[in-house]
Image (cartoon, helix red, strand yellow):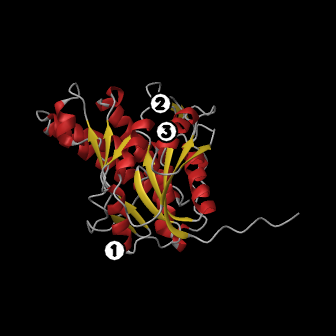
Amino acid sequence: MSAPAPAPALRDEVLIGICTFRRPELAATLASLQALEPCGLPVSVAVADNDARPSARALVDKITPRHPLPIAYLHAPEANISVARNALLDHARASGARLLVYLDDDETVEPAWLTQLVATWRRSGAGAVLGPVRAHYDAAAPAWMKAARAHDTLPVLGQDRATITSGYTCNTLIDLGDPATADLRFDPARGRSGGEDSAFFADYLAAGGRIAFAADAVVHETVPAERARLSWLMRRRYRSGQTHASLIARNPSMARRLREAGIAAAKALACGGMALAGAAHPATRNRQLMRAALHVGAIAHLVGARTIEIYGTAPGGPVIALRQNPKER
């Protein structure tokens, strides 16, 4: 048997990777890329279709001939977001693109978006760069939700309020030439529950990686009606708490689990108290309720509760299922 061909040397090129699952909004995402300002590097696009049948192929085939950027279609048919993310990782490495930029299939970009990500990468020397996601609501969305910017995505900062301690993949540049990214993969065990990006970046940071923030690398996301509800936000925060706790639980120490569960319980109670105190102010009250849900999710995972699944269903369909926690690796 012949040895596998070596991967090509990485070049200073950008691959914009988009995971998709039955979302017609993908057309608007690809259209927004047509107006990108030049970033000084060659740019291409790859779409990883996570549906069991290649449902996005016709849309991509229709758009590709008249799009200014080369677009590759990848079929990653597992209804598991980690499979799609890994398909894009593999495609970037196989094509020799050094910079992989993840973008969601329901987002649109500003013309300067990619220029800002690349400029921050050059300036900071960091191996990963995050940009902000700004949510947009329709007229029927609650006023408190708009005031609280409840669906915006921004980096999580450490106690020094400067160091970024976690990452996400809805607006992210990853330098595959950074040694800290070597052999990193998105965990398929997290591919339905979510949190695969948090785990990926936890491993990246543990390997010595560093994350920067490009405040002007803005993408926009329209919040659909089914997500413009407090119940959806609280489930999402609950799942985020489960993800955070699952990373803690990689440490097998029962003493640490109990200590973290106690801390989370105290924080949940404190958030509940602040929600009561701010009952007359919906934005304040609901923000505290969402924080409480985060801590309750952490407690639930640490004591062995089931994990919420959020991927593998069609947009607009059921978004929550439950399964037993996978064993920690």
Q: Alpha carbon of mark 2 to alpha carbon of mark 3: how far?
A: 32 Å
Residue 118 sits above or below residue 131 on the image: below
Give percent across and percent down for residue 228. Answer: 30, 30
Give percent across and percent down for residue 195. Answer: 47, 48
Give percent across and percent down for residue 13. Answer: 49, 65
Task: Please state which amino acid type lies under the numbered disc 3.
Answer: Ile
SS at circle 3: helix
Viewer-side label of 1, 2 = 1
Badge 2 local density, few (<14 within 10 Å), some, or many (20+)? Answer: some
Q: Earlier in the sequence, mark 1 or mark 2?
A: 1
Quadrant where the N terminus sits is: bottom right
Badge 3 local density, few (<14 within 10 Å), some, or many (20+)? Answer: some
Which one is in front, 87 or 267? 87
Circles 1 and 3: CB atoms closer than 8 Å: no
Task: Please state which amino acid type lies under the numbered disc 2.
Answer: Ile
Which one is in front, 269 or 194? 194
Tell me if 219 is positioned left or right of 71 in this view.
left
Q: Alpha carbon of mark 1 to alpha carbon of mark 3: how far?
A: 34 Å
Q: Which residue is mark 3?
A: 63
Q: Residue at x 39, y 38 (%)?
A: 28
Determine which quarter of the picture holds residue 2. Answer: bottom right
Quadrant where the C terminus sits is: bottom right
Q: Which residue is mark 1?
A: 123
